[in-house]
Amino acid sequence: MNWEAVFRWIETHPGLASWVQAVGSIAALGIAIWISSSQRRDQLKAAEKAAKSKVDALVAVVESASMYVTVLGVMIEKKPGAFAFGQSWKLVHKQWLESSIHSLNQLPAHEFGRGDLVRGYFGIVSVINEINRLIDSAVNADALQELEFAFMCEEVLIKIEVVQTIWRNIQKLTDI
């Protein structure tokens, strides 16, 4: 085969330039579509990663509150006396629990992204608020009797078990 003849035919063929231009345009369109699709896919991955990071941060606040309530439960299980518990509640634990409640109340619940996480979040918030109310009313009673204190401790421990159960469910849902 004589390459000189092939090159001469390419240079002198009247419609070949338009065909080359058409093929080049089609290739350019294909590459542009591929690049656009690739960028869109990368944007979606970045958005999913950002959403997951946000949910992880929200869940970390719920985890912190749940852990504190668990620590409170451990203290109650050691059966401190009513007076000792009342003093430690007023000096330390009340502020810690209220800080947890405040942090939980600041969370935008709709950003958990899933209904079951939102329900778990609201469950934990309501139970922790109830724990705070129970302890506060018992400690602030005029004369806290040992029997009333024991009843309050049992009620609080039951509520803490509820928080722990909800937290375990949230852990399963978020793979923590």
Image (cartoon, rainbow, N blue to C red):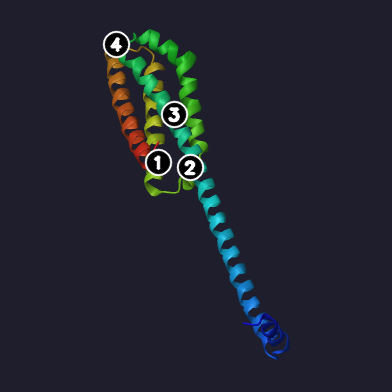
Q: Which of the two discs, 1 and 4, sits closer to the camera?
A: 1
Which residue lies under the disc numbered 1?
A: 174
Circles 1, 2 touching at the beta carbon (< 8 Å): yes
* Cα–Cα span, label 3 and label 4: 28 Å
Identify which residue is drawn at 50% across, 39% down: 107
Quadrant, the N terminus: bottom right
**Amino acid type, mark 3:** Ala
Residue 11 vertical position relative to residue 88 in the rendered view, above or below = below
Which residue lies under the disc numbered 3?
A: 65
Say if residue 108 shows up in the picture. no
Q: Nearer the viewer, residue 36 or 144?
A: 36
Which residue lies under the disc numbered 2?
A: 55
Image-quadrant location for residue 76: top left
Which residue lies under the disc numbered 4?
A: 146
Residue 123 vertical position relative to residue 142 in the rendered view, above or below = below
Identify which residue is drawn at 67% across, 80% down: 3
**Crowding at label 3, few (<14), some or many (≥20) Cα neighbours within 10 Å?**
many
**Amino acid type, mark 4:** Glu
**Amino acid type, mark 2:** Val
